[in-house]
Structures are given as C-alpha cells and as structure tokens.
Image (spheres, rainbow, N blue to C red):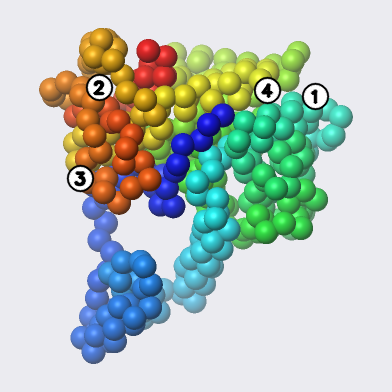
Amino acid sequence: MHHSPYLDKRDFSGGNDSLWTFKVPVSTGIAALDAVLYGIAREYAGNKDPKVLRELLSTAILAARADISPHDLDVMNRTLAEMLEADTMFSPYRHVRKICVFGSARIAEGEPAYGTARAFGRLAAENGYMVITGGGPGIMQAANEGAGAERSFGLNITLPYEQQANPVVAATERLVNFYYFYVRKLNFVKESDALVACPGGFGTMDELFESVTLMQTGKATIYPIVLLDSPGRTFWANWSRFIREELLDSGLISPSDMNFLFMTKSPEEAIAHINRFYSRFHSYRYSGEKIVLRLLEPLSENALRCLEREFAPLIKEGGMEITAALPEEANEPLIADLPRLVFTINRGDYGMLRRLIDAVNNV
C-alpha cells in the first residue's frame, strides 16, 4: 500500500478541541514566580509553544501547593513520565501508519487464533504498516511475530502475574512498560490508524469498547475496527449477536453505530478492509462548525452531489464542496496539497460519518 506523507503532529481528536471548556492554569497566583516561569518557558521551550510549557510548570506548582495527598501528586508525576516515554518512542515513526492488535494473553501457539493473528501481522507489515500490541504473550506475541521486530511496538503493562514482554519486542527500543492502564490505552488510541481485535477476555473487551465509545461520541478520530476470528470459530459472531439483541434492539445504541465494526475470519479480508479505508480518504479535522476531509484524490462533481444527497442528515446547513487546504490547516504543510471535502457538520451521528468515509472511498 502507498502511504502518503503524514505529520509529525498527530491529533487523535481530529482538532475537535473547540468543544473543550476546561481551563488550563496560566498562573500560579504568585506574580514573582510567574515571572520566573515565563522566563524559563521562553528559554527552554525549544520549538514548542512557550505558553504550553508555562502552563505545564504552573500546573505542577499548583499541584504541589494543593490540598491533595502525596499519592495524588505521585500519580500525576508517573502519568506525565509515562506519556513522555511513549511519545518519545513513537516520534520517529509518525509518518508510518500503524495497526493496533488486541487479543488474549492466554491463547497459546498452535491454537487457531494464534495463527490467524500471526498471519495478520505478517500481512500488515507487507502492506507497509507497523503493528502495535500490548507487548505480552498470546495474541500479542503472535501479531508481533508476524510483523517482525523491526515493524512492531509493544505497550506492555506491569502486572504482578501473567504478563511479561514477549521476546519479539523485549529487546527492542519500541517497548514501553506502563504502570497505568489508562495511559497505555490512551496510546493505543492516539497512535493507531486501525484496530484489529482478536478473541480475548476482559482486557480485550475493555480496550475494544473504549475505542468504539470514543469514536461513537466524537472524542477520537474514526478509523477501521476489525473483529478478526478464525475459520470455524464463533467468538465474534456470538459477541455481535449480543450487541444486536441486547443493545441495538433495546435502543441502547443507534443502528449507525454498527458501521464502526467489520467482522471477518480472514486476515486477507481484514487488511483489505483497512487498505480500502485509506484508498482515497486520508484524514479529517474540524474547523469550527465545519469538518474537513482530506483526500488523496479529488471527487467528481457528480460524485459530490450524490454524497450530498445520500448524507444530507450529516449536513447542518449549505452543501458539500471540494476546496484547497483551509487557513486553519497551515500547521500541516506535508498534506497541504491534498484536496478537501468540506461541509458544516451536524454533530452527533458519528456512525454515519464512518459510512460517509466508506462512500468517499467507493465512489
């Protein structure tokens, strides 16, 4: 697969921070200290925004002076340190698309699911992707084996039992051992361009449901989610039946939410589904009330009008148009030449937005 240039700056929310109302502290409340932090920020921010560094320093000072426990402060400190280690590890590979593979640590080599995961990892690497797993044994090791050490990442979790880093990633520089599950899961979501879920237990269910929820609510950029089983097995078929009968039929989720999920027993179908998602569509971001879909090739006028009619419920006002990069995208020069599909979006039905991306790729 041809991978178009991506950015050093990956925003897993698609630039959706216009809805963020929480205010980051910009002052410690001590004028003399603020002046010192201002000077430190200007001197040591490097190519980053000094304002952000000043806010980080102010937050740290406020945390130290707040009426919280030492443990609370330690949690903040560990969280930031883990985020820094993971971001530093991923930084050299920002331009490469990555697929996250979830699955049980308890599935042994020789079981069908193990072979399926290994076959998928191999296909992912052959198609130009890197593979992110939880770094442990079972399905995680199988996917890393298939991809090979040079195209694998491991986001391991330190547990008092069961999980040690698998031998594929253990000796590489692409392994992080997390203490906190939530920081680990954040990195799964923000660093991935697709998700493949193999059979697994509570951990796999947790990771899958959180990923779907973030997309369903617009908190994370939409990408392909594949439920990968093995021939003759019914793990995801039974799971899907529960979702349809107990959630969908009860009105607890919307019919369009099912658009997020693609179920298969074939590693070849799984990788083809992911490749198809990025065949014309590149990425998207928000610009105020508008959504901007970046495309690898333009749409014809006829195709544009067909999409406009089919997805009218997604359009808040006006219509769809093909444009050049918007001024708000000036900080993304590597993809400035890509055509844009732009419209004012009626937020809420992100499952329909997922279907629009498929339609953009198929017209």
Mark 1 to mark 4 CA distance (whole Å): 12 Å
Q: Which mark is residue 112?
A: 1
Category of crowding for the residue at label 3, using alpha-carbon neighbours closer than 10 angstroms: few (below 14), some (14–19), many (at least 20): few
The answer to which of marks 4 and 3 sits earlier in the sequence is 4
Say which residue label 3 marks. 327
Dots 2, 3 in contact, CB < 8 A? no
Q: Residue furthest front?
A: 337
User: Which mark is drawn over residue 314?
Assistant: 2
How far apart are the alpha carbons under marks 2 and 3?
23 Å
Q: In the rendered structure, are the residues bearing label 3 and label 1 in contact, judged by CB atoms less than 8 Å apart?
A: no
- The Cα atoms of the two marked residues, 1 and 2, are separated by 41 Å
Residues marked 1 and 2 touching at CB (< 8 Å):
no
Tell me the mark number nearer the camera, choosing from 3 and 1: 3
Q: Of all residues shown, which one is farthest toward the right? A: 110
Residue, disc 4: 267
- Residue depth check, mark 2 versus mark 3: number of the one nearer the observer: 3
**Numbered disc in front, either 2 or 4:** 4
